[in-house]
Image: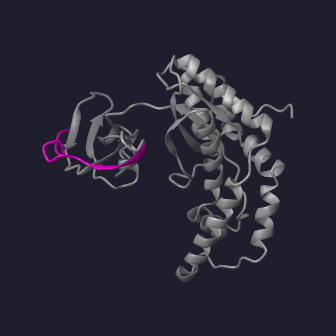
Amino acid sequence: MSEKWIYWLKELGTNDNNIVGKKCANLGELTQAGFNVPPGYALSVEAYKRFMTETEVTDRLLEYLKGFNADPDKVADTLKFNEASIEMRRIAESVAMPPDMEETIKQYYQELCNITGCVNLYVATRSAGPVSHPGQYETYLNVCGTDDVVRNVRRVWSSTCNARSIIARARLGLPLHYDPIGVAVLTMVDSKAAGVMFTVNPVNGDPSKVAIEGSFGFGEAVVSGNVTPDRYLIDKVTLEIEERVVSDKHMEFALNPQTKEMEYIDLPPEKRKIP
């Protein structure tokens, strides 16, 4: 197919929200503005649609869902959604990508390795929806090698069928089998500490303040709520820190060098209360 479905971040801006999803479009906008954004590329919403259609995953999901009946507002039916999610994800992840898509994704990854000067670069594969779904779809970190990139792009797509997502769509009366998203493939940052910045005070909406929350390791520990992060409230005009809370951070989300897997690791007592 001739329609473009993959882009370097530097090609994108906020006008491309509906093409690649907000995350990718905003990262492209920052890249073009000269910010220090980790190099990467984006698969468009069209790529998701191609995969789901050309591999007949959509048809197989619709066939499976013919016999599915559950109420998203009944706690007792949560298990039904969980079981449906497992089977739907198995269907989506059991088929190969169209060969031309797979080859193109691999070529972009190899070029990303060339750009960064790193053989077998570690990347993250992240969802990017045209409409924001904070925390709803999944991210895979420290992905390495062409085959692993392809596999984890497919896993991000299949995460549109995780239980929390199909329950949310059921409550809104939307199709359970389908929610087109973009995917970002981004160079990993080997973060010693990470977190979240809010450009207004999230407690009271004060636009004159910036709130920063952070902890050791990768940002998953903060955004998941598994660690109580340090918190700083900063005045936008004076840049003074008006409030500083250093928490007892009992663990970090980091790469285990032995298993090569991301996991929660206990912090030693002497590090827990270091800002």
Q: In which image quadrant can residue 128 be found?
A: top right
Q: Nearer the viewer, residue 112 or 272?
A: 112
Residue at (67% x, 38% y) in the render: 20
Q: Where is residue 9 in the image (x, y as percent from the top left)?
A: 61, 27
Q: Where is residue 210 in the image (x, y as percent from the top left)?
A: 34, 38
Confirm whether residue 231 shows in the render: yes
272 drawn magenta: yes
Residue at (65% x, 40% y) in the render: 150
Q: Give the range drawn in magenta.
A: 261-275
Q: Nearer the viewer, residue 59 or 183?
A: 59
Q: In the rendered image of this protein, does residue 169 appear above or below residue 12?
A: below
Q: In which quarter of the image is the N terminus?
A: top right
Count the numbered circles shown.
0
What colouring does the structure picture have?
one colour
Q: Quadrant of the C terminus?
A: top left
Q: In the rendered image of this protein, does residue 253 appear above or below residue 239?
A: below
Predominant secondary structure in magenta?
A: loop
Q: Where is residue 135 in the image (x, y as percent from the top left)?
A: 50, 53
Residue at (82% x, 61% y) in the render: 59
Q: In the rendered image of this protein, does residue 182 appear above or below residue 203?
A: above
Q: Is residue 26 left or right of residue 206?
A: right
Q: In this view, does 98 lie to the left or right of 213?
A: right
Q: Is residue 41 left or right of residue 223?
A: right
